[in-house]
Every structure is written in C-alpha cells, then in structure tokens.
Amino acid sequence: MTAIEVSRATGLRSIGYAKTPTAGNELHLAGADAITDSNHAAGRARPPQPGNGLDVPGATLRPMPVKLDNVGIAVRDLDAAIAFFTDLGLTVLGSARISGEWADTAVGLDGNTADIAVLQTPDGNGRIEMFQYVHPDAIEVEPVQPNTIGMHRICLTVDNIDAALEIAARHGCRPLRGVATYEDVYKLTYLRGPSGILVMFTEELKKED
C-alpha cells in the first residue's frame, strides 16, 4: 500500500502524512563523471550524464523529487504489532479500514479491504505502514530468513539495545542468535518480531574521549 489520505466519503479517520518533497531532495548521479575511459574499453556502458540527452529521441534526464515515505508490512494481528512498536517508542499517526475501487486499483486486488495503521519513529524521519487483511484472506508463508531474496527486515536504531531487547522479550520476541559488536562501532542483532517480521536493532557505540 502507498501513503494515502482516506477519502471523506468513507467516514473513516484520515491518514494525511504524505508530504510534498521539499526542494533539495532531487536525485543526482553521484560520481557519474568519475567513470574512466577504462570502462568504455571494457565494454561497459557509461550512464547518462545529468542534463545530457538520452538515446531516446526527445528524452532528457531530469532530476525528480523523491523520498522514502514508509515501509509497508502485512501483519497477522495489527493490535499486537502496534503494541510491539509503540512500546519501542514509535507513535501511531493514524488508522483506518480502507476499501473501495481506488484501493483495488492501487493495490491490484479485487475487493481489497484491510485495517491499516501508520507509525512514526520519535525523530519523525521513519514511518511504517502496517496492514491486516480483511479481504482477500491473508496468505500465510514460512518466516523469511536473513538470506531470503527481497525486502524482509526493518532496522531500528536504539539508544540501548539491551533495553530494547527487554521490551521485545515482553512480546515474546528474541534474537535469532545473539547480539554482535561490529568493530567497536555498533551493537546489532536480528530478532523475529510480531507476525514473523525480521527486525534489526542497532546501537551506535559512543567512543570515550
């Protein structure tokens, strides 16, 4: 599902969290000019340069404002998922039951009906949209593994990974193996969250002066 604002015609609580991208969010091909002639000699194609015409007649490469708005996750129990993430500090921006022709068209499912909730991290920069399907029935699958192809986990940066794991444990969620330390820079771990969601906790280690 995409970021939406529920129509007044539904009589449901609206979720109006999508914002127009601000100036300065344009995409740039960083480092494109640094590609050397050896790439051409090796037969590798040079990517289009900003402002240059593409091979397609009349087409040009123009930066497009874009931002990552949210990550969508289908869950088995929406209330349980909300409880897990709100205990970790996220807040609920809005919730609704969505359905209708527009939802069928956007998602690509006939009779698409789902209860959704949008949660936001305390810094306001990260959002999760979770949805529990009413129709069609949700499809149960084996929990994905860390090496499963495709999108399969979210990462939350926390101030205290041990405290975060204590909160997760109250929801029956524990690390897949343990907590690792990466080069005295981060502590990190993967755990199985509600509805089998893979959640990564990471804590940046503060160096003492």
Image (cartoon, rainbow, N blue to C red):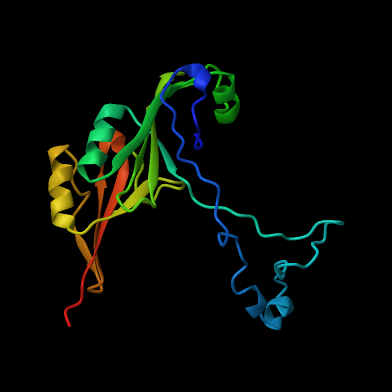
Indicate whether 52 appears above or below 70.
Answer: below
| x 46%, y 36%: residue | 16
Residue sticking out furthest to the right: 57
Residue 85, image x, y percentages? 26, 41
Q: Residue at x 26, y 71 (%)?
A: 185
Left or right relative to 146: residue 100: right
Q: Quadrant of the C terminus?
A: bottom left
Does residue 36 appear anywhere in the picture?
A: yes
The answer to whether residue 137 is visible is no
Q: Is residue 150 above or below residue 16?
A: below
What's the residue at 22%, 73% (across, down)? Answer: 184
In terms of depth relative to the viewer, which is nearer, 136 or 129? 129
Q: Is residue 33 above or below residue 105?
A: below
Q: Residue at x 18, y 56 (%)?
A: 161
User: Where residue 11 sits: x, y (%)?
Assistant: 45, 17
Determine whether, in the image, residue 49 is placed left or right of residue 193: right
